[in-house]
Every structure is written in C-alpha cells, then in structure tokens.
Amino acid sequence: MLVTVLNTTYTPLHDVSVRHAHTMLWRGVADVVEEGPGMFAGAPTPSVLLLRRYVPERFRYGRRPRRTATFDGPVKQNVGRFADRIAVYSKDALLVRDRGQCAYCGQFNGTTADHVLPKSRGGPTAWLNTVAACEEDNWIKGDRTPDEAGMPLLWQPFAPTAASLDRLRR
Ligand SMILES: [Zn+2]
C-alpha cells in the first residue's frame, strides 16, 4: 500500500511507502490529511499526507509547471489550485459538507460523524467513509454497515473541494 504526499499547495507530489510516511510524520515534516484502513506500528495507516513546507515542483518527476515572469501569473495559478483542491478532512468540515443533515433520517440534527464502514472494522476517517448523523441514528447503527442495520444512506458521501466548503460556511 502506498501513501500519497501532497505539497503545501495540495498538488500530489509522489507516493511513498507506509513506513516512509510514518518516518515523515515522526520527523514532523508532514501531517495526515486522510487515514486509510488498517494499522501500522500501533497507529492508523495514513493514506494522504500534507507537507508542512513547500517543495518546489521542479523537483517533481515528469510534468513541469510552466513559470511566468509576470506578477499575477503565480497568483492566478494558486487560485485555480485552491478551487480544485480537496478540503482537509475534519469532523467540523464534515458537518459543513452535509449542512448538519443526518444521512439516515434527513433531519437537520446531525451533530456526529458516522463511519459508514465502522472504524472498529477498519473504516477510515475520511470524506468517502463518513456522513453527518444525529446522535440517535449513530447510536442505533452502532458497529454495523448501513446494509446490516437496514438504514440506507440518503446520499453517498463525497470529497468536497475546499472552495465549496468555504461557500457553505458563508
Ligand atoms: Zn438521524
């Protein structure tokens, strides 16, 4: 299994091994953006890391970004990246994505993050495996999948862009 390393601009740089990813975390050069399924050395396996310091992309293998000499060139580039990049996952951000609506009963009382595939069974804490849920439905569903619990999801979880979350926060 490989871990994707994102630059500070959220551009994917390269993939590294899980062992290497843990070394990066231990050295404090990157943070976890998404956890993958499974454990490694007593900690959840990361699936995506975000570098703390910018790595010039000329060091990327392959495609080289075109540099412009004008002042607004790089700024415009960054705006484009921001609009397209996937938002960093957090419980608060999840509740914003789902506008506090419970994915099981549809009421706007979703205050908890429910793992579609339960965490205890290796489900990652990540955009595609979590939905906002009311406390009651989260408790009733417990350690089961929506199928097992007979609680179909009203919509499928998705990874929002940072820009779309910003619009919802306003
Ligand atoms: Zn509910």
Image (tube, rainbow, N blue to C red):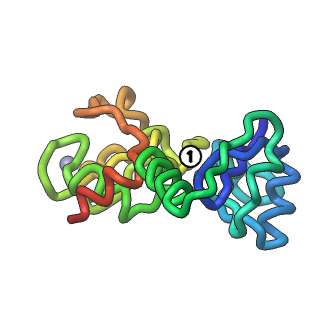
Placement of the C terminus among the 4 image quadrants: bottom left
Residue 74 higher or lower than 150, as above or below: below
Q: Secondary structure at mark 1?
A: loop
Q: Residue at x 78, y 59 (%)?
A: 42
Decide if residue 93 is on the left or right side of residue 43. Answer: left
Of the pair 31 and 161, the residue shown nearer to us: 161
Decide if residue 147 is on the left or right side of residue 167. Answer: right
Of the pair 169 and 44, the residue shown nearer to us: 169
> Residue 145: x, y in percent?
42, 34
Q: Image quadrant of residue 69?
A: bottom right
Residue 27 higher or lower than 96, as above or below: below
Q: Residue at x 75, y 57 (%)?
A: 56
Extreme residue in the left direction: 107
- The answer to whether residue 88 is seen in the rendering is no
- The answer to whether residue 154 is seen in the rendering is yes
Q: Residue at x 87, y 53 (%)?
A: 20
Decide if residue 102 is on the left or right side of residue 51. Answer: left
> Residue 143: x, y in percent?
45, 44
Q: Residues within 10 Å of mark 1 (few under 14, many from 20)?
A: many
Of the pair 59 and 168, the residue shown nearer to us: 59
Placement of the N terminus among the 4 image quadrants: top right
> Residue 9: x, y in percent?
59, 57
Of the pair 154 and 145, the residue shown nearer to us: 154
Q: Residue at x 67, y 64 (%)?
A: 31
